[in-house]
Image (tube, rainbow, N blue to C red):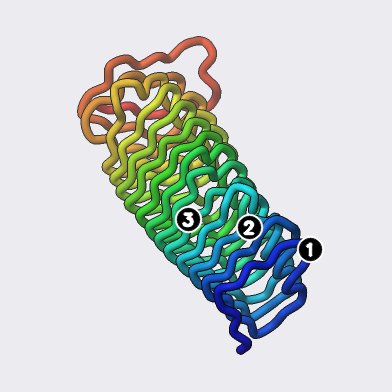
Amino acid sequence: MKKIQNGYYDGERPFYACHGLRLEGVTIGPGESALKEGGDIEAVKCEFQGKYPFWECQGFTVKECVFREGARAALWYSRGCRMYDTLVEAPKMFRRISDVYLENVKLPNALETFWDCSGVTLRNVETSKADYIFMHTSGIDIDHYRQQGNYSFQYARDVVIRNSVLDTKDAFWESENVTVYDSEIRGEYLGWYAKNLRLVNCIIGGTQPLCYCENLVLENSRMEADADLAFEYSTVQATVKGRIPSIKNPTSGYIKADDIGEVIIDENLKAPGNCEIQF
């Protein structure tokens, strides 16, 4: 493997189509496509300032690096990415990437990140300003994740999340096969139109959660005081600890809780309209 240390490279495609390359302490300045079409690449303690450095790459590892805001859209159309202990200040990262693993990574400007990806694993990752993160992405495995950003996981499929805190309204819209364990989810309009959404030992906050869901399951979860008007037009099997502020027109299944503030069943209830409510 060729090694390059402590240099500065800018302009167009300084390492285009390189394979078997290790960069240590290198700065990639303004320009485009520094490592495009490369493979078997390692970048350690590097700084990326230019656009699109990792496009169409096959197999690359990034450790202890920084992607500045100018390095927006840095990782697209690639396969086999491993990223550790890295700060990503740029938005619109990770598009159409398959087989990607992140550990101890912070993304403080994660707007429109992880779109149309597959095979995504996150461990101890933090994101902020993360509106529309994980759009149309499948095969997501997350543990110890913190997120601030709305409209997340829209149209996502085959997702498992554990031990995480999500501050996000409109999360999981039209998602499919999502399971969340031991996590906090706070934000309005959670999970609308989701199929096979399962929440286990979770805390749920925000108005009008979990409406228009198909095959919704809650196990041993809690709902906060602002989680009102829940379950409208959902097919649901829910066992909730504590109090549900209010329930409106669930379609079928059952809802069990220690206490329910209000049950609203009106003329707009949809068939079969036989949800069993117990408290």
Q: Which residue is mark 2?
A: 117
| SS class, disc 1 | strand
Q: Which residue is mark 3?
A: 87
**Distance from the alpha carbon under mark 1 to that under mark 3:** 23 Å
Q: Are marks 2 and 1 in contact (CB under 8 Å)?
A: no
Which of disc 3 and disc 1 is earlier in sequence? 1
- Mark 1 nearby-residue class (10 Å; few <14, some 14–19, many ≥20): some
Q: Nearer the viewer, residue 34 or 275?
A: 34
Q: Which residue is mark 1?
A: 12
Amino acid on which disc 1 is placed: Glu
Amino acid on which disc 3 is placed: Leu
Q: Please state which of the two labelled residues, at mark 2 or mark 3, is closer to the viewer.
A: 3
- Viewed as shown, does residue 111 lie left or right of 242? right
Which of disc 3 and disc 2 is earlier in sequence? 3
* Res. 208 visible in picture: yes
- Mark 2 nearby-residue class (10 Å; few <14, some 14–19, many ≥20): many
Q: Nearer the viewer, residue 275 or 26?
A: 26
Q: Nearer the viewer, residue 46 or 152?
A: 46
Q: Please state which of the two labelled residues, at mark 1 or mark 3, is closer to the viewer.
A: 1
Amino acid on which disc 2 is placed: Cys
Q: Position of residue 174 (x, y in %)?
A: 59, 39
